[in-house]
Amino acid sequence: MKINTAEYLISSAKVEQCPKAGYPEYAFIGRSNVGKSSLINMLADNAKLAKTSSMPGKTVLINHFLINRPVEGKQHNAADAPWYLVDLPGYGYAKRSKKAQEEFEHMISSYILEREQMTLLFILIDVRLEPQKIDLEFIEWLGENGVPFAIVFTKADKVTKGRLGGNVQHYLKVLSQQWEELPPYFVTSSETGKGREELLQYIGEINISIANQEE
Ligand SMILES: Nc1nc2c(ncn2[C@@H]2O[C@H](COP(=O)(O)OP(=O)(O)O)[C@@H](O)[C@H]2O)c(=O)[nH]1
Ligand SMILES: [Mg+2]
């Protein structure tokens, strides 16, 4: 699929405030600092779209971006159909108060469970790290709730090729203790653009199958 335009639309504190159009929606989530903003910018080929920040935990809003804004009077191809990209706040930010943490969890879970347009959730995992409890628990929660998701390993440029393959396989092995069938996964680097084509193609294929169902 092609990205013709990518623009920031709105930040919402609640799922009810999110945009109303029924475009397919792909949300990105992960621990603070996992590389979410960088990945979104890399996908959109716009270094400033989602603010990257070295200060974790700042964003506590649901950020909607519109990819491929429809042009009035012009038919779009399935390959460059409009979709929403959603930047969800990072979890696992230790400095939140208990109350803030509860509000945060409520916001995330209501978005994930109630947002009808949400087609797929991408969970970002720093490929350098041992599987983290917080991510594994989150993935388990998604499974319990039947939420469709895929895994995006980030920062692939930060490890050697050998360790990259080894870490990915190790992660999948840990997941396979929980899961009979492994989720789709992508290995990416925002520095080098690795994984961009694969991710966009995957999203494009889902968009096409949704468009075909609607016909
Ligand atoms: N080398 C490298 N650094 C990255 C990559 N992705 C993110 N970073 C760095 O990791 C830090 C956190 O990235 P950011 O996108 O702000 O993470 P977020 O908190 O998940 O949105 C920043 O210093 C980024 O420059 C990557 O693919 N490769
Ligand atoms: Mg960010």
Image (cartoon, grey):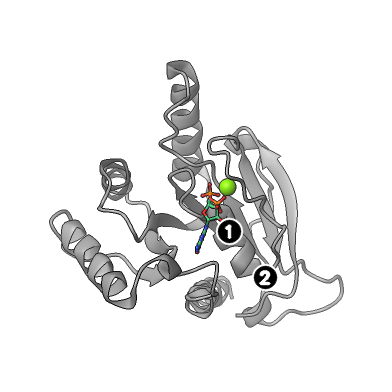
Q: Is mark 2 within 8 Å of ligand 1?
A: no
* Quarter of the view holding residue 3: bottom right
Q: Which residue is tagged 1?
A: 38
Residue at the location (27% across, 42% down)?
A: 137
Rendered-image quadrant of the C terminus:
bottom right
| Amino acid on which disc 1 is placed | Ser
Q: Residue at x 24, y 61 (%)?
A: 171
Classify mark 1 as within 8 Å of ligand 1 or not, answering yes or no. yes
User: What x and y, as percent, mark residue 23?
Assistant: 63, 61
Pick whichever of labels 1 and 2 is earlier in the sequence.
Answer: 1
Q: Could you tell me how far apart the alpha carbons at marks 1 and 2 are, in whole angstroms?
A: 10 Å
**Residue at left offset 16%, top offset 63%:** 173
Looking at this view, is 142 or 185 the one in front? 185
Categorize mark 1 by other alpha carbons within 10 Å: few (<14), some (14-19), many (20+): many
Q: Nearer the viewer, residue 68 or 60?
A: 60
Going by the numbered disc 2, the residue's amino acid type is: Asp
Residue 115 position in % (x across, y down): 53, 46
User: Does 124 sit left or right of 77 as displayed?
Assistant: left
Q: Which residue is mark 2?
A: 45
Mark 2 residue element: loop
Q: Residues within 10 Å of mark 2 (few under 14, many from 20)?
A: some
